[in-house]
Amino acid sequence: MEYFPTNGNTLMALPLDKTCDFVALKRGTGSANEDKRAGTKKTNFHSTTIRIQGGTLTSAQIRLCIKQAKKDCGPDGHAHRCTIGIERINGDWHIHIAKVLKVPKRDRGTANSNRYNYTYTRYSDLLKGTFKNEYKTEDTDKAVNVYQPGKGKEDGFTQYTFLAYPLKHLAEGENGEAIYPDIDAPAKTAVLKEGEAPTVLYYSIGLFDGYQGEELATQKRLLSKAIKRAWETKLEDQKKTVMDGSPEFWHKVVPAFCKEHNLVMAKDYSNWGDIAATMWQYADLNVSYYLQLKWFGYTNLKDLALIQGREAQHRHVAEVIDNKIQDSLERRAKRKKRKRRKIGTAGEHQSNEAQTKELADAKAQLAKVQSILEKTTRELAERDESLATCRQSLTHARKTINTMVQETCKEMAR
């Protein structure tokens, strides 16, 4: 963090543990809720966010904002101190400026007010014409948004907490985890646009004016804690995704993570454990991953808690998950083998049943044929018997006729 003194305040005007000053504004005469608290806020905590949706702040715009913030915290300015943080979301840069004013004020005035005396109009006029009018912030209809704490934060909302928000990313660890930031570490920088010189991302103006020695070290330590709390609060909004080893986890969650981070899942499962361990150690503003107790195992989680160092923890998680993958593959192979064996046995049984059925059908068919053959044999035998009877009758008739013919011939011969 880069620190600028105010060049005017040699003694602290307000201690950093002082809470926000609120002025309760009442509704006017004739209002339906006359003399009740109005929604308009008037405090000495003004946090300005300048975020251009569909565009990004340039280094020139940021320099204008920092120059104005220095002026605001000067001897003739509106504020005692402020912190500044420059952040990037989806490739676009925006800025947070948290100021502690000398007296409570509204963030904007009436039509006849001096625009320079109010936070919103001061910064909107500062940047007027430097970005396209159609650009809007994500949450409001303006590129410049001023936040003041509400009624619910009147008690206990200190300067530490308020001023820590623009600096929250100082508490972001290597993999997104919350850490205690070193206030005196070299300022973090980034190149906002290719070809430009690096820009310092975090500033404070008049933050520790008047503090020296042990008291200064104490104030820095307390601010470091507040910054860590601010980052932890931000992480609470994360989507927490369970790592449970389910088909959905391996075939939807992990591939989505790999696609986002340019990783490739090996077809032989050789790097799946390593990828899962990387996911477990990963965290950002949107998502974090945690190991399901039932899947990962109580003993393994207990052992993990005793391991020191990120690399050693990574190896442990990868090894445990690789073993689980191997066990799962072996169980799957056994199930397939049992299934094939069952199918084979069932096939043999089915084959025997088919053969038995075919044999029974053949026997039934043979019996039917035999029955038909016996019937035919009987019918033929009856026909033969009838033919024999007919032959005998014909023979008898022939003899009778011959006898009659002979007798007739004898009588005619007489």
Image (cartoon, helix red, strand yellow):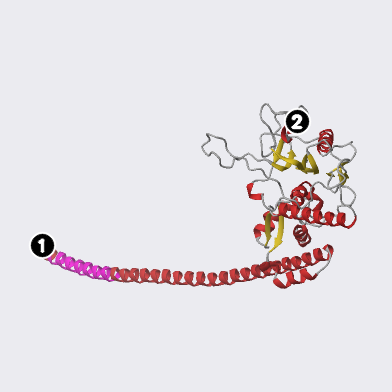
Q: Nearer the viewer, residue 106 or 120?
A: 106
Where's residue 80, x and y in %? 80, 42
The label shown at residue 63 is none
Quarter in which the C terminus is drawn:
bottom left
**Residue beneath the point at 81% across and 57% down:** 180
Where's residue 316, x and y in %? 79, 67
Give neighbour class at mark 2: few <14, some 14-19, many 20+ (Cα, 10 Å).
Answer: some
Magenta segment boundaries in residue numbering:
384-407
Magenta stretch secondary structure, dominant: helix
Inspect this view and state whether residue 332 appears. Answer: no
Give neighbour class at mark 1: few <14, some 14-19, many 20+ (Cα, 10 Å).
Answer: few
Please name the amino acid that badge 1 sits on: Met
**Residue beneath the point at 68% across and 39% down:** 138
Please name the amino acid that badge 2 sits on: Tyr
Tags 2 and 1 touching, CB below 8 Å: no
Question: Residue beneath label 2, please?
Answer: 116
Q: Nearer the viewer, residue 237 or 391?
A: 237
Mark 1 secondary-structure assignment: helix
Examine the image and state in which quarter residue 107 appears: top right
Alpha carbons under labels 2 and 1: distance apart: 172 Å
Magenta-colored stretch includes residue 207: no
Examine the image and state in which quarter residue 294 appears: bottom right
**Residue beneath the point at 20% across and 70% down:** 396
Image: 91 above or below 316: above
Where's residue 229, x and y in %? 75, 55
Question: Residue beneath label 1, please?
Answer: 412
Q: Nearer the viewer, residue 185 or 120?
A: 120
